[in-house]
Amino acid sequence: MPRLTPANVARARETISLYPHPRSALIPLCHLAQEQDGWLTPDAMEHIAELLELTPAQVLGVASFYDMLHTEPVGRHLVAVCTNIACLLSGGEELLEHAERSLGVSVGGTTADGEFTLEDSECIAFCEEAPCLQVNSRFFGNVDAARFDQLVEDLRAGRLADSVPRHGTLSRVRRDGGLKVPAERVAAERAEADAARARRKAAAEQEAGR
């Protein structure tokens, strides 16, 4: 199982530097590892634990809590069909049943070629386009059986690669600006915070010694 690549280790260290406490970068690093491999491999979680000075069990405990993070292999395309109330009333259950027949897998299953994993989603907040689904966090609305089959065909053929990257990729554009803070400012503010904590601790000890 792969650990983080050298390039992703550099990205991980850059991300960690933005937080006052390394462990605060845990979820972003999990997303980074999932972007690399499509899921969180045991070795990747162990590597994240080393970078954040945590135990692998702590990383797994957090990763297994969130639906967006997968600790077991999934297909290149994660298809999540919404069956919440708006979609339910518009044919969401029937769409999910069709998806199972079309892909040849039950909910939670992955096709033999590793291309598709099917999920039943509680709600994806796209109610105005019910019934709807997500493929790798990309939205598709007003999906019926025919449109679902066309979508699967297009994904298999790579015709949607520009808009639907493989599972794990939240964004293919790295932000370099906006909310990014210069490293010098981060270091200065962190030093100031550490000094303030030290002053408070010294004051408390002095008060306790009276």
Image (cartoon, rainbow, N blue to C red):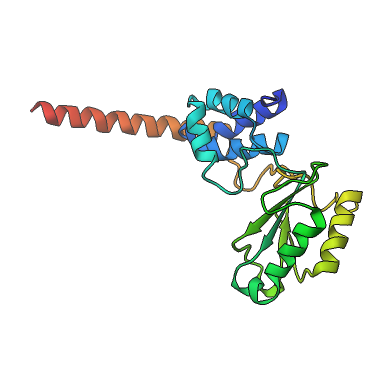
Q: Residue at x 18, y 27 (%)?
A: 205
What is the number of callouts on the image?
A: 0
Residue 77, position as x, y percentages in the image: 77, 48
Q: Where is residue 180, by image quadrant?
A: top right
Q: Residue at x 71, y 72 (%)?
A: 129
Q: Residue at x 68, y 74 (%)?
A: 128
Nearer the observer, 7 or 117: 117
Residue 117, position as x, y percentages in the image: 73, 48
Image height check: is 53 above or below 163?
A: above
As drawn, the residue found furthest toward the bottom would be: 89
> Going by the image, does 16 lie left or right of 117?
left
> Going by the image, does 2 lie left or right of 53?
right
Nearer the observer, 167 or 152: 152
Image height check: is 85 above or below 177?
A: below
Image height check: is 96 above or below 115?
A: below
Q: Residue at x 85, y 61 (%)?
A: 149
Q: Which quadrant does the C terminus fall into? A: top left
